[in-house]
Amino acid sequence: MPRALLPILESIGLDDKEAQLYLVGLSLGSAPASEYAKLSKLNRITSYNALEGMVQKGIFTMERKMRAKWYAPVAPEYLSIEARKNAEALERVLPELRSLQGAKHRSPHVRFFEGWEGVRKVYEDTLMASGELLNFANSAAVRQFWPGYDEEYVAARVKRGIHLRGIAPDDAAGKKVHGEDRQRLREIRLVPTKDFDFRNEINIYDHKVAICSFGHGEEVFGVIIESKEVAETQRQIFEMAWRYAGRK
């Protein structure tokens, strides 16, 4: 049994015994509880109870053969679909869950993320936005740093229905990005590059402000500031800049 897979199955809601029986079932196929117990080295009663529980959860199917119950696991793809549904359901109710959290537990705090993996985590957090994203960005800089930015991040944002309003330098990359606004669920306004050549990216959403820096080596980092007051101030600054960009 590939035991390295057990923690992954447990992370989607199976307990240790259920995860063992599921992995055994993938190679065993349809079989009575006694066969599952033998291969998983669990006793018969434990195996039977766990299998019955997973039938109730829809993780296993059961049919009667020769006066006995035979069990078979559903396809792994089903587990993936169900896990994705659960994650998406949780994301949809995050604003409601946050609203239940008392004000004294929502004290402002700052999270710092280092390196490329850290920056990706910052971007992933912006995909949790319950409303519009407001954005200051250098269209060329972020795509040079992250070649798959459009195919990975932008596509994920569009799929989640998160609209973006952004301000970017009026260079070749900015013009190209601006030209794709409609299909990318965004509205970009361009400002003179000689005056506003942004070198990092700022996203404002919900009660958060996320900053990503695309320097070299130790300069690659991300910061998420969680504060209703800070986010609201940055939102007002963005709106002021948005009006200026509209006049240009």
Image (cartoon, helix red, strand yellow):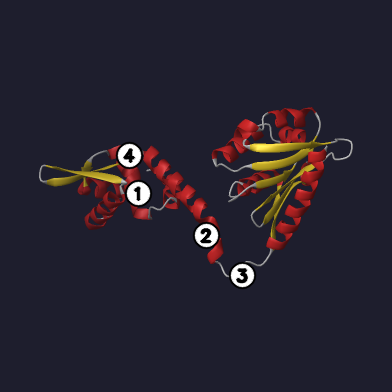
C-alpha distance separating marks 4 and 2: 39 Å
* x and y, in percent, of residue 75 in the image: 34, 38
Q: Which label sits on residue 20?
A: 1
Q: Name the residue located 41 percent from the left edge and 41 percent from the top edge.
A: 81
x and y percentages locating residue 174 in the rendered image: 76, 32
- Please state, as top left, top right, bottom left or bottom right, where the N terminus lies in the image: top left
Q: Which mark is residue 103?
A: 3
Closer to the observer: label 4 or label 3? 3
Q: Nearer the viewer, mark 2 or mark 1?
A: 2
Which residue is identified by label 4?
26
Q: Alpha-carbon distance for marks 3 and 2?
A: 14 Å
The residue under label 2 is 96
Real-space CA distance between mark 4 and mark 1, rounded to the nearest whole angstrom:
10 Å
Q: CA distance from mark 3 to mark 1?
A: 43 Å
Secondary structure state at the residue bearing disc 4: helix
Quarter assignment of residue 224: bottom right
Q: Residues within 10 Å of mark 3 (few under 14, many from 20)?
A: few
First along the sequence among labels 3 and 1: 1
Q: In terms of image quadrants, where is residue 243? A: top right
Measuring 40% from the left and 53% from the top, which residue is drawn there?
13
- First in sequence: mark 3 or mark 2? 2
Image quarter (top left, top right, bottom left or bottom right) of the C terminus: top right
Left or right, 33 with reference to 107: left
The total of numbered circles placed on residues is 4
Q: Earlier in the sequence, mark 4 or mark 1?
A: 1
Disc nearer the start of the sequence (4/3): 4
Q: Residue 84: tell me if it is visible.
A: yes
User: Callout 1: few (<14), some (14-19), or many (20+) C-alpha neighbours within 10 Å?
Assistant: many
